[in-house]
Amino acid sequence: MTTVDPRQPVLILGGFLITAEAYAPMAAWLKQLGVFDAHVVPVTRLEWLLTTWGFGWRRVLDRVDALVQQLQASSLTGRVTLIGHSSGGVMLRLYLSDEPVLGRGYHGATRCDRLITLGSPHQAVRATPLRMLVDRRFPGCYEPGVDYVAIAGELDLNGDNASSFSRRTASGSYKSIAGDAELSGDGLVPVESALLKGARHLVQPDTAHGGFFGKLWYGSLQRLESWWTFVTND
């Protein structure tokens, strides 16, 4: 297993239509814990809508690359840890590769030695063409020098944490992504889809995909501490 210094800088790429301020408490908590620096990639809702097309992915990943190189310059290890929530986790798998896709190869694995994904729809029966491209061309833990960690949430739809939206829509989301409405998941992404093949896995109980899906989600401090402890106790 790749040995990663938990204090090295962290870059966070959020999920579709979720803006950077939602991840500010996560970045602040990591810095208080002793992480050298933690930044969130700024992406507007319009820019997220543009990721329906390849040029939109390229726009976001170019920004990721610029910030990674900025953090790498001040990293005591010379490396950066990546955290990707939801679609951000899938996009960062592409960033790690050195193969040209969308007109550019980012060579992210030469700069980053850990990728943590939070509720990312890695394996899906039905996915966007770009997400399908990532899983087809860079399946599982594609870069051998990177510690891949996949965190999935298992939301109790009958419990107090789940939102009314999750109770209405979760089964339809699970069926759409994985072909089975009876699966468990975080209110949007089923567990089996979020657990990237070959990665270190953690299924976190009663954890929602985001604040819209439940009161406590991956970015809530009550859940963040648990998965970060799992990640760093390697």
Image: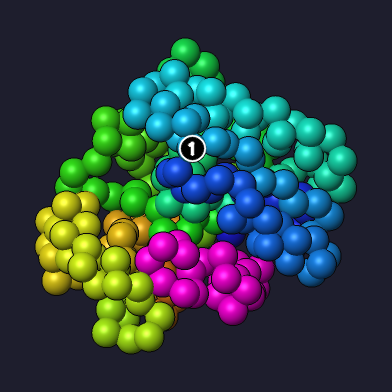
Q: Let me know if residue 175 is in the magenta part.
A: no
Which quadrant would the C terminus be assigned to in this image?
bottom right
Q: Let me know if residue 226 is in the magenta part.
A: yes
Query: In the figure, is residue 36 to the left or right of 105?
Result: right
Q: Residue at x 49, y 30 (%)?
A: 47
Q: Residue at x 63, y 51 (%)?
A: 21
Q: Which residue is mark 1?
A: 45
Q: Is residue 33 above or below residue 64?
A: below
Q: Is residue 99 visible?
A: no
Which stretch did the figure color magenta? 210-234
Q: Residue at x 48, y 69 (%)?
A: 217
Q: Bin the neighbour count of mark 1 within 10 Å (Cα to Cα): few under 14, some 14-19, many 20 and up.
A: few
How many numbered tags mark residues here? 1
Q: Is residue 16 above or below residue 169?
A: above
Which quadrant would the N terminus be assigned to in this image?
bottom right
Query: In the figure, is residue 195 to the left or right of 215?
Result: left
Query: In the figure, is residue 23 to the left or right of 9?
Result: left
Q: Residue at x 49, y 53 (%)?
A: 85
